[in-house]
Amino acid sequence: MGFLDLDKNFAFYAAYHSSRINIAIHMIFVWPIFFTSILLINFIPTPFNLPHINLPLFGNNYTLIFNFGFLFTLIYVVSYVFLDYKAGSLAALLCFFCWVASSVLASVLGFQLAWKVVLVVQLISWTAQFIGHGLFERRAPALLDNILQAFLMAPFFVLFEALQIFFGYEPYPGFHDRITLLVDVETEAWRSKNAKLLP
């Protein structure tokens, strides 16, 4: 599977998310996982001084440091823009917003409180998604088959799916039809594999 092949990657993701309830659960809980991950990564010390920007906000000055949180965000941003420059650009803006907001929140909360917030949000978000897969999808999450897909692509694909559902977005004419065919092939392969595993 090409790392930046939108069709194949989205078809792989869509094959694991066909239930409307499971899709809604992912739309609600995937981005909080991304946000709180950056929030925690902001506290990782860097071995050298990094550039920073002073950000006046709500009458206070906050410092945005180009740290590991920024690097983590940048990896996502570049991947998303290369996948699809229109939807990817919107996803990139959301990623940068998450970095800025998490940096501000990190300085307000401090590590002692921030890690507790991260733990609660992550536990709730991951639990909701596993429930969505177990009860409504009746299929194990994609992370069990492709961990990179689950962690790197999921925020982009829930946004991409929302753009499709609410605005009928397609990166090119016929995208939806092509994805439907690819998902059918992926689903059939999964069913055949499971049938062989049964006694």
Image (cartoon, rainbow, N blue to C red):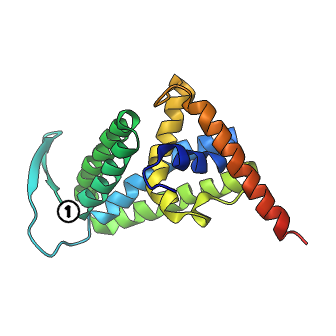
Q: Is residue 17 left or right of residue 65?
A: right
Q: Residue at x 73, y 56 (%)?
A: 189
Quarter where residue 69 is shown: bottom left
Quarter where residue 72 is shown: bottom left
Q: In x, y percent, where is residue 33? A: 45, 55
Quarter where residue 145 is shown: bottom right
Answer above or below: position of 109 versus 22. below
The amino acid type, in three-letter code, at marker 1 is Asn
Q: Is residue 18 visible?
A: no
Nearest to the observer: residue 73 or residue 195: 195
Q: In x, y percent, where is residue 127? A: 60, 59
Q: Is residue 71 left or right of residue 115?
A: left
Q: Which residue is mark 1?
A: 67
Q: Secondary structure at mark 1?
A: loop
Crowding at dot 1, Cα within 10 Å, few <14 / some 14-19 / many 20+, comes out as many
Q: Is residue 69 left or right of residue 140?
A: left
Q: Residue at x 59, y 45 (%)?
A: 11
Q: In x, y percent, where is residue 37? A: 38, 60
Q: Quadrant of the C terminus?
A: bottom right
Of all residues, the one furthest to the right in this rendering is 199
Nearest to the observer: residue 56 or residue 96: 96
Q: In x, y percent, where is residue 44? A: 26, 70
